[in-house]
Image: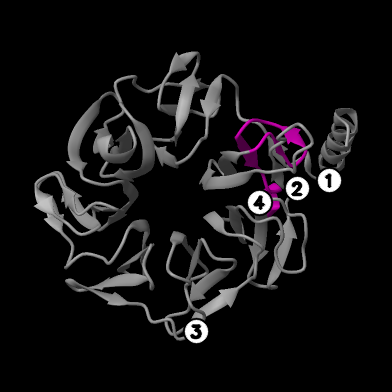
């Protein structure tokens, strides 16, 4: 296929989605470049990691206040892997370098300055707050002053502590469901903290294929998980129930309005083809919906690619970061927002 034909097809693709979804999608400001992953809301502002620059200033983190992008501080070193707000501070895990020379650190931000908290001997992939304490998960086996097998706990007053006997593999996702801490990652089952010990959340229904859970969300009091398997699963306190299938994995989820929004590598979901990496699931009707999709135009007549890496609700709108050039027919680079009609929020 000649390049001119590819360009004509792209124009058709953009025009089609612009016609059906442009009124709900929009770009977010200008002057910020990066992957916009991860995302976190702190002190009424939206922070994005994985950044290259904001406002023509080189930075690993950018801040969106609803009107403009800024770089909150240039002294934060390393690519941000995960963030969370805890006790009035923004915590960010970073990675500097790759391979055996990589350094993995944890910092906190008080809206003015960054403060070094500690270092690990492996990546920090997940941060979550339960009862005012920050839980840290990743590939590490040692963090700051303690031996900790893939999971640790931190407080300003008590410092670092182990969490049970640790977890069997690299942790990618942490959440609290019905006052218990759940962990998912590169291990065979989801685990939860029962008192001081970890226990398997038994797969008496659908198997979590070799673990690789990448995200959790509580949707109508059921715990949903997604990851490097081709479906969603939900835990109803007794069984893992499959919700799917997809044709590829999912990376992120968020509850917005009455829907569960899912983003990832997939391009089709049950009864809907060409959703292109983002979909809306309504549990009341068990229906999946196309939102216009996101695509990345690779050029040279290569197939459309793209993915969604992060989803978050900020000021009653759904924000998403990933790899794409077009979102629902709107031209925007790696970051976009989606708005439901006011009556549906």
Left or right: 91 in relation to 47: left
Q: Is residue 36 visible?
A: yes
| Residue 233 image label | none
Of the numbered discs 2 and 4, the one sitting upstream in the chain is: 4
Using a 10 Å C-alpha cutoff, classify the residue at mark 4 as few (fewer than 14 neighbours), some (14 to 19) or many (20 or more).
many
Q: The residue tagged with tag 2: helix, strand or loop? A: loop
- Mark 1–mark 2 Cα distance, whole angstroms, equals 7 Å
Of the numbered discs 4 and 3, the one sitting upstream in the chain is: 3
Of the numbered discs 4 and 1, the one sitting upstream in the chain is: 1
Which residue was labeled with disc 1?
Answer: 20
Q: Can you give x and y, in whole percent of width and height, for residue 310 in the image?
A: 52, 46
Residue placed most toward the observer, 67 or 31: 31
Q: The residue tagged with tag 3: helix, strand or loop? A: loop
Which residue was labeled with disc 2?
Answer: 292
- Mark 4–mark 3 Cα distance, whole angstroms, equals 26 Å
Q: The residue tagged with tag 1: helix, strand or loop? A: helix
Q: The residue tagged with tag 4: helix, strand or loop? A: loop
Q: Are marks 1 and 2 in contact (CB under 8 Å)?
A: yes
Quadrant where the N terminus is found in the figure? top right
- Mark 2–mark 4 Cα distance, whole angstroms, equals 10 Å
Q: Are marks 3 and 1 in contact (CB under 8 Å)?
A: no
Using a 10 Å C-alpha cutoff, classify the residue at mark 1 as few (fewer than 14 neighbours), some (14 to 19) or many (20 or more).
few
Which residue was labeled with disc 3?
Answer: 205
Which residue was labeled with disc 4?
Answer: 277
Q: Is residue 253 above or below residue 188?
A: above
Q: Is residue 71 above or below residue 229?
A: above
Quarter of the image holding residue 344? bottom right
Eye-nearest disc, 4 or 1? 4
Q: Are marks 4 and 3 in contact (CB under 8 Å)?
A: no
- Mark 2–mark 3 Cα distance, whole angstroms, equals 33 Å
Of the numbered discs 3 and 1, the one sitting upstream in the chain is: 1
């Amino acid at each position: 296929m000649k390049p001119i034909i590819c360009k004509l097809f792209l124009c058709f693709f953009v025009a089609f989605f612009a016609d059906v979804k442009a009124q709900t999608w929009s770009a977010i400001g200008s002057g910020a470049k990066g992957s916009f992953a991860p995302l976190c809301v702190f002190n009424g502002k939206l922070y994005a990691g994985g950044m290259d620059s904001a406002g023509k200033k080189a930075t690993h983190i950018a801040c969106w206040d609803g009107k403009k992008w800024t770089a909150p501080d240039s002294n934060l070193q390393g690519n941000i892997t995960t963030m969370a707000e805890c006790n009035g501070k923004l915590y960010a895990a970073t990675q500097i370098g790759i391979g055996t020379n990589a350094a993995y650190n944890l910092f906190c931000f008080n809206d003015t300055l960054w403060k070094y908290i500690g270092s690990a001997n492996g990546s920090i992939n997940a941060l979550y707050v339960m009862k005012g304490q920050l839980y840290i998960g990743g590939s590490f086996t040692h963090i700051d002053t303690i031996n900790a097998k893939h999971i640790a706990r931190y407080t300003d007053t008590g410092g670092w502590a182990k969490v049970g006997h640790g977890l069997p593999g690299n942790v990618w996702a942490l959440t609290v469901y019905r006052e218990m801490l759940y962990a998912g990652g590169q291990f065979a089952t989801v685990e939860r903290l029962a008192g001081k010990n970890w226990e398997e959340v038994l797969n008496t229904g659908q198997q979590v294929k070799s673990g690789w859970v990448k995200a959790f969300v509580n949707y109508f009091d059921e715990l949903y998980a997604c990851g490097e398997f081709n479906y969603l699963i939900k835990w109803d306190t007794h069984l893992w129930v499959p919700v799917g299938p997809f044709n590829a994995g999912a990376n992120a989820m968020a509850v917005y309005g009455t829907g569960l929004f899912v983003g990832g590598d997939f391009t089709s979901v049950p009864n809907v083809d060409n959703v292109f990496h983002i979909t809306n699931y309504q549990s009341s009707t068990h229906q999946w919906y196309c939102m216009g999709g996101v695509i990345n135009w690779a050029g040279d007549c290569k197939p459309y690619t793209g993915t969604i890496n992060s989803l978050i609700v900020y000021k009653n709108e759904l924000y998403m970061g990933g790899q794409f050039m077009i979102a629902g027919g709107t031209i925007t680079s790696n970051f976009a927002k989606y708005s439901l009609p006011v009556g549906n929020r």
